[in-house]
Image (cartoon, rainbow, N blue to C red):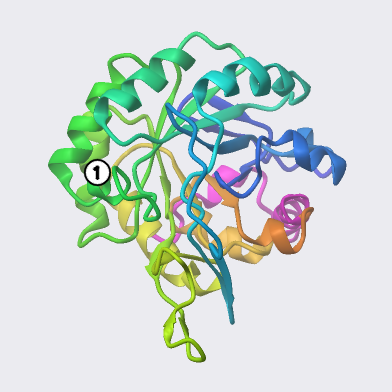
Amino acid sequence: MTGVSLKVDIAGIKMQNPVTTASGTFGWGVEYSQCFDVNLLGAVVLKSITYKQKIGNPPPRIIETPSGVLNSIGLANPGIAVFMRETLPQLKAIKVPVIASIAGDTVEEYVSLAERLASEKQIAGIEVNISCPNVKEGGLEFAVSTVQVEKLVSAVARVVGHPLIVKLSPNVTSISDIARAAVQGGAHALSLINTLVGMVIDTQTRRPALVNKVGGLAGPAVRPVAVRMVWQAAQAVDVPIIGMGGICTAEDALQFIMAGASGVAVGTYSFVHPGAALDIIHGLEEFCVREGVKDINELVGCSI
């Protein structure tokens, strides 16, 4: 026993430590049980669910870059009906909080998804993904307008039965304004950032490498942008924040926490090292012991 408390509370979602997974990088959570005990995490965030099945964009839809990946998956998932029937029962094996991520093409679809999940006790929270850059409809259409953000979030907030987390896009003029709009709409917490829009050109074919032409850049390259945006959002609103974007080590995670995040999410690096999240948990505890920090919450926003 180290005497250090890593427990955090994200809008009523009580986590044994601040480390969770980024939506779209951890499947349904149960897949990673083959690699490590996922019940050692603070929480598990599922891949985004849509109202109807999405097969996603055609390949190639993921390209490696020098400091991350550019992806254009397109929210591939089986849809809410299959999720409820086949995936939800499997989640009983996960004992830590499970956060469902929802995405839609219209406000009505987001509301319908929230209603379907409202009474599910296996779900501890709902993350509203308003920031996917890889779909033709919805996606960034909602994320870049304060009016649209508040309208969408308020509609979901009226029917949601769980803590409501809104996932923000970095592809905006003012993250502070968007954060305030989400909270005014009824968000209980925020998560940021989603991927930055980018492009890779294949110089041999002289064409974009992705069939969808552009994709979302994730990985260490986006971390300084993500830390800055978490820092700005934390000063703009008074709700818990889950920070993400290129987190690979405990040192990376600490930057987000000190910028104002109560929780952090590991995304792309899980593809490189499936057990990265556990290493980060251990690293956070070691830092606190070394620095004489008794409670991880003492570090939240200490750089502001």
Taking depth in this image into account, of 231 and 206 the one nearest to the observer is 206
Note whether 117 is above or below 107 in the view shown: above
Query: Which residue is disc 1 drawn over?
Result: 142
Query: Is the residue 87 above or below the residue 141 in the image?
Result: above
* Residue 129 figure quarter: top left
Q: In which quarter of the image is the N terminus?
A: top right
Can you see residue 140? Answer: yes
Amino acid on which disc 1 is placed: Phe
Point 67% across, 41% down: residue: 6
Q: Residue pushed farthest bottom? A: 204
Which is more toward the observer, 157 or 41? 157
Q: Does the magenta stretch include residue 294?
A: yes
- 197 or 266: which is nearer to us? 197
What residue is drawn where x is 77% and y is 39%?
A: 31
Q: Does the magenta stretch include residue 21?
A: no
**Residue at 79 percent of width and 53 percent of height:** 275
Q: Nearer the viewer, residue 94 or 297?
A: 94
Q: Where, quadrant-wise, is the C terminus in this rendering?
A: bottom left
Provide residue 189's location: percent of width, then percent of height.
40, 35
Do we see residue 123 in this rendering? no
| Highlighted range, magenta | 276-304
Q: What residue is shown at x 17% (from left), y 48% (from top)?
A: 145
The answer to whether residue 293 is above or below residue 32 is below
Residue 147 vertical placement versus 211 (above, below): above
Q: Specify whether 21 is left or right of 243.
A: right
The x, y position of residue 218, in whole percent, is: 52, 64
Q: Name the dominant secondary structure of the magenta segment.
A: helix
Task: State how many labels appear.
Answer: 1
Label 1 environment density (alpha carbons within 10 Å; few <14, some 14–19, many ≥20): many
| Picture coordinates of residue 210, whole percent (x, y) | 48, 69
Left or right of residue 13: residue 40: right
Toward the top, the furthest residue is 119
